[in-house]
Image (spheres, helix red, strand yellow):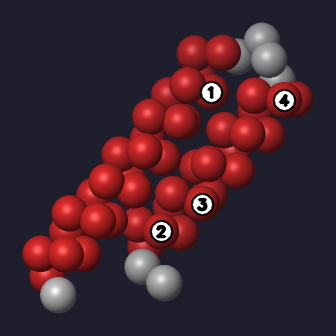
Amino acid sequence: MSIWTILFVILLIAWLGGFTVFHVAGGLIHLLLVLAVVSLILHFVLGARTT
């Protein structure tokens, strides 16, 4: 399991938890979602290139 996959899972869980529990902090929650998607994309791009 690569660091990008772990980062994606952590950020996704934080986003889901924040979205359901702390609905007030909407901007930060969506920022976490964007970071999770970027880390997933980097995982596929860099993982495919280095293999």
CA distance separating discs 1 and 2: 19 Å
Query: Which residue is label 1 attached to?
Result: 29
Mark 2 neighbour density, 10 Å: few (under 14) some (14–19) many (20 or more): some
Mark 1 neighbour density, 10 Å: few (under 14) some (14–19) many (20 or more): many
Q: Secondary structure at mark 3?
A: helix
CA distance separating discs 4 and 1: 10 Å
Q: Secondary structure at mark 4?
A: helix
Query: Which residue is label 2 attached to?
Result: 5
Q: Residue at x 82, y 23 (%)?
A: 22
Q: Secondary structure at mark 2?
A: helix
43 with respect to 11 (left or right): left
Q: Residue at x 48, y 47 (%)?
A: 36
Q: Nearer the viewer, residue 7 or 45?
A: 45
Give amino acid for label 2: Thr
Q: Are marks 1 and 2 in contact (CB under 8 Å)?
A: no
Q: Are marks 2 and 4 in contact (CB under 8 Å)?
A: no
